[in-house]
């Protein structure tokens, strides 16, 4: 299992809206106000690419975006999006295999880390940390379970999602990895933290 969403690419957005209404979208769209003008942006695991259209509503031009997706079908859907005059380079690779000399101003990892087992999460964090400029921003959005917001229904929903994705042979993770310690140990500061869907979705803007 390598977390490739090819099998459900055509249905992913419908499924997401069915279960989470627009919470997954809202959590990501709200973060876009922090995008600096004319910046270089790395998006890892962007799915069907709807976020490219949301970004283009804020900046129709001037951004240099690298869009890394492990799913070829997700890449194909994303390429059809109207990202206006922003420059978008599509890379069909797992982010762990993506090498670059670019130092990015912003990195987006929306619902990426919750697919990963700990070893991969640690590796990808280290890699992306190296690709982000000093003072750069990292937009993290993931599911969240912890002592203060760990209600039974969140636990149940998460278990059901992991079982569903296991059945399809897509996702390697069995449990959520708490990424917060990685950011704090690497010296990141939290600029904004917002919760959605009763606290089950956590959106954080980290500054390096
Ligand atoms: C849960 S979906 C989220 C999609 C999108 N961010 C959204 O919120 O609509 C996770 C996406 O990450 C992609 N993905 C999973 N592992 C990846 C990896 N190692 N590198 C790049 N993309 C990956 C999957 O193919 C899938 O499209």
Image: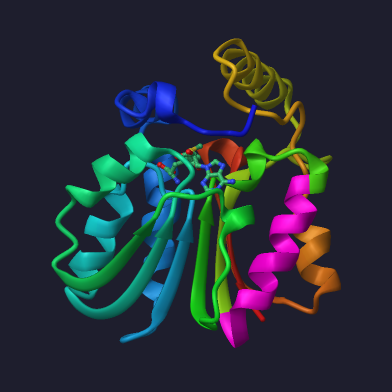
Closest to the observer, 202 or 40: 40
Quadrant for the N terminus, please. top right
- Tell whether 199 sits left or right of 81: right
Quadrant occupied by the C terminus: bottom right
Looking at the picture, does residue 55 appear above or below residue 155? below
Q: Tag count in the figure?
A: 0
Looking at the rendering, the stretch of residues picked out in magenta corresponds to 120-136
Answer with the quarter of the image where residue 8 lies: top left
Quick one: 70 or 37, which is closer to the camera? 70
- In this picture, is 168 found above or below 154? above
Image colouring: rainbow
Residue 97 appears at what percent x and percent y? Answer: 61, 55
User: Magenta region's main secondary structure?
Assistant: helix
Would residue 87 appear left or right of 174 to someone viewing this image?
A: left
Which of the pair 51/167 is nearer the observer?
Answer: 167
Any part of residue 203 in sight: no
Q: Please tell me whether residue 41 is drawn above or below residue 68 in the rendered image.
A: below
The question of residue 184 being in magenta is answered with no
Residue at 45%, 48% in the rendered image = 69
Whether 135 is among the magenta residues is: yes
192 relative position to 75: left or right: right
**Above or below for 64 versus 15:** below
Q: Residue at x 33, y 65 (%)?
A: 89
Q: Can residue 117 be seen in this view?
A: yes
Name the quadrant containing residue 34: bottom left
Give how far across and how far down residue 79 sits, in percent: 23, 50
Image quadrant of residue 200? top right
Taking the spot 39% from the left edge, 43% from the top edge, the residue there is 47
Residue at (69, 66) in percent of width and height: 127
Residue 130, position in %: x, y?
68, 76
């Amino acid at each position: 299992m390598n977390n490739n969403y090819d099998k459900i690419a055509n249905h992913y957005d419908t499924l997401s809206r069915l279960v989470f209404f627009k919470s997954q979208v809202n959590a990501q769209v709200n973060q876009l106000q922090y995008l600096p003008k004319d910046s270089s942006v790395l998006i890892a695991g962007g799915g069907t690419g709807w976020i490219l259209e949301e970004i283009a509503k804020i900046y129709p031009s001037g951004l240099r975006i690298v869009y890394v997706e492990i799913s070829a079908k997700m890449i194909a859907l994303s390429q059809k999006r109207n990202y206006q005059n922003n420059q978008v380079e599509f890379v069909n690779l797992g982010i762990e295999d993506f090498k670059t000399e670019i130092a990015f101003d912003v990195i987006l990892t929306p619902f990426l880390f919750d697919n990963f087992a700990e070893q991969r999460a640690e590796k990808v964090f280290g890699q992306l940390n190296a690709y982000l400029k000093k003072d750069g921003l990292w937009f993290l959005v993931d599911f969240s379970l912890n002592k203060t917001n760990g209600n039974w229904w969140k636990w149940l929903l998460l278990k059901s999602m992991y079982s569903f994705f296991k059945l399809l042979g897509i996702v390697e993770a069995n449990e959520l990895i708490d990424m917060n310690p990685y950011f704090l140990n690497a010296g990141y500061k939290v600029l904004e933290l917002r919760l959605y869907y009763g606290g089950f979705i956590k959106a954080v803007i980290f500054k390096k």
